Image: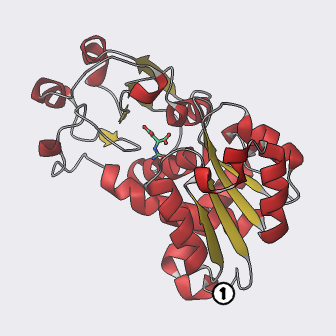
Amino acid sequence: MRHLISINDLLEDELKNLLDVSDDIEANPQKYRSVMDQKVLTNLFYEPSTRTSSSFHSAMLRLGGSVIQINEVQYSSVSKGENLQDTILTIGSYSDFIVLRSQYAGDAKIASEASQVPVINAGDGAGEHPTQALLDLRTIYKNKGALEGMKIVFVGDIANGRTVHSLGSYLQNNNECHYFESYEDMTSELSDADVLYMTRVQTERGSTESYELTRDHVDVLSKECIVMHPFPRNDELPRWFDLDPRAKYIEQMKHGLFMRMAILTTLE
Ligand code: NCD
């Protein structure tokens, strides 16, 4: 049994394999349509989610399995004081995978230590979000043809950004990574950036910054620089940029579906 708690859990050839399998799934979906026959995945979400939850849901259905969706934890025994471990043991009795999103960094690890089925970290507080990093890596690889030797500029709520923690943790080994909490400071690093990775201000974790991508920033970007964002976006990423060919954040969502199908297929 394998869990996916941190991006650092993955070996280099496992990442390569996930990229290959996700390509094969995209090219030959019929080959995979019953590989999860009779399998059940539980989406256990203690925090809101649109993309992560629905893409895992869609991934499991497209692989022939079923999904138990638990969003409103106030309707389960958690509101009666049940601890995470007991919740995980219970859900593991009824399902073959647990996709967990929680408010606290470290919860996914605690859950995996208690669990009898694979636990996939779908975001643990301000900790990590490894499956987002994997879909981000697929996006970069598809657009740039490499995962090394690039300049990556991260901007936004770096301290609270779990997607940045996971993606940066992988990329920093073989790339030049720059992290900015303010949009003013980053301008000098934009002209030769290969990837601009933006995130929102996480007000629910106490952040109060405000910033916005401006036309001046965009004018500095090279023609080849891709702009990514895990979403949800707020004011930092204006909609007028959506039609720019460098905007890859809608494409990222599609990569999320194929990558999560690949993750489920290979974790089993
Ligand atoms: C992110 C998350 O939940 O960490 N969303 C996502 O999964 N795509 C980013 C965020 O909430 O800002």
Which residue corresponds to the image point at 72% horizontal and 43% vertical from the top-left?
5
Q: Position of residue 135 (x, y in %)?
A: 51, 52
24 sits to left or right of 214: right
Which residue is more in the foreground, 43 or 235? 43
Q: Which residue corresponds to the image point at 63% horizontal and 84% vertical from the top-left?
A: 64
User: Mark 1: which amino acid?
Assistant: Ser
Is residue 153 visible to the viewer in this orientation of the structure? no
User: Would you name the residue on which mark 1 appears?
Assistant: 34
> Does 255 sit above or below residue 223?
below
- Count neighbours of disc 1 (C-alpha within 10 A) and say few if under 14, some if 14 to 19, many if 20 or more: some
Outermost residue on the front side: it is 80
Vertical relation: 171 (above or below) 190: below
State yes or no: Cβ of the residue under disc 1 lies below 8 Å from any atom of ligand 1.
Answer: no
Task: Indicate the position of residue 188 as horizontal and vertical percent values.
Answer: 27, 14
Looking at the picture, does residue 171 appear above or below residue 45?
A: above
Q: Is residue 185 left or right of residue 34?
A: left
Q: Is residue 250 left or right of residue 146?
A: left
Q: Quadrant of residue 263?
A: bottom right
**Residue 211: in sight, yes or no?**
yes
Give the image quarter of residue 82: top right
At x 84%, y 49%, the residue is 86
Return the x and y of residue 169 as percentages of the image width and height. Answer: 61, 30
Q: Residue at x 31, y 50 (%)?
A: 248
Q: Nearer the viewer, residue 212 or 193?
A: 212
Q: How many marks?
A: 1
* Viewer-nearest residue: 89 or 236: 89
When asked about the image quadrant of residue 201, the answer is top left
